[in-house]
Amino acid sequence: MASHVEQMIEGTDGARQRVLVHLGESPLSWLRARGRLSERHFVAGDTLRADWERAGLGARVTMRWDSAPTTGGRRGPGRAFDPTLAQMAARERFDGAIRAAGPGLADILWRVACAGEGLAAAEKALGWPSRAGKLVLTLALDRVADWYRVP
């Protein structure tokens, strides 16, 4: 499997250029490595992504291997899914951070930080003009950094 793909991006001067993108690198890491995000913004976005993953909010791509629920009998009554305290705490932090970002800003924040969409793909999916996403993303990350108390 390839670890890099070739993509066309638009530079800050408006010129398009061909770049290699590492598939294991998150969009936030990519933006930070190129000086387009501050360390504070990166930490806020990465913390949000980590809470999203801890809370188990992402799509499952594998089968759950825990035992099937029982309906009674010798094993006792069936049990519903019981999230751990860590999952519940992560969900509360994630929900609080998304509320702190606010409506209109949370969309691109979730797409880039959690879903791993590139900035251009997120702008296109939201129907925004190019380069509008970076401004909105940094505003959202600013609010989330304040919420997480990132220095």
Image: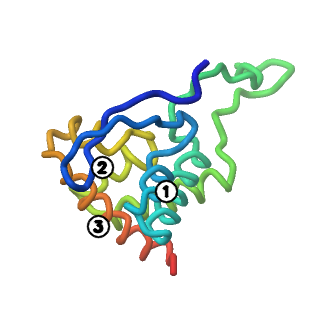
Look at the picture and state if 143 lies above or below 33. below
Residue 30 in the image: x percent, y percent? 46, 49
The percent position of residue 4, horizontal first and vertical second, equals: 53, 30
Numbered badge on residue 139: 3
Q: In this view, does 132 lie above or below 79?
A: below
Q: Which of marks 1 and 2 is in front?
A: 1
Please state the horizontal and vertical placement of residue 110, each as a whole percent of the image.
38, 48
Residue 89 or residue 48, whichever sits in front: 48
Please report the residue visible at 38 percent of the width from the left and 65 percent of the height from the top.
141
Amino acid carrying label 1: it is: Ala
31 and 44: which is toward the camera: 31
- Per the image, label 2 sits on a secondary structure element best described as helix
In the image, what residue occupies the spot 68% across and 55% down? Answer: 85
Q: Which amino acid does label 3 sit on?
A: Leu
Left or right: residue 70 versus residue 102 is: right
* Numbered badge on residue 33: 1
Quadrant (top left, top right, bottom left, bottom right) of the N terminus: top right
Residue at mark 1 to residue at mark 3: CA–CA distance: 19 Å
- Residue 115: quadrant of the picture: top left
Instruction: Say which element carries label 3.
Output: helix
**Camera-side mark, 1 or 3:** 1
Looking at the image, is mark 1 or mark 2 earlier in the sequence?
1
As drawn, is 33 to the left or to the right of 61?
left
Against 3, residue 84 (above or below) is below
Q: What residue type is labelled 2?
A: Ile
The answer for how far apart the CA atoms under marks 2 and 3 are is 11 Å
Residue holding disc 2: 108
Q: Which residue is drawn at 48% across and 71% down?
A: 40
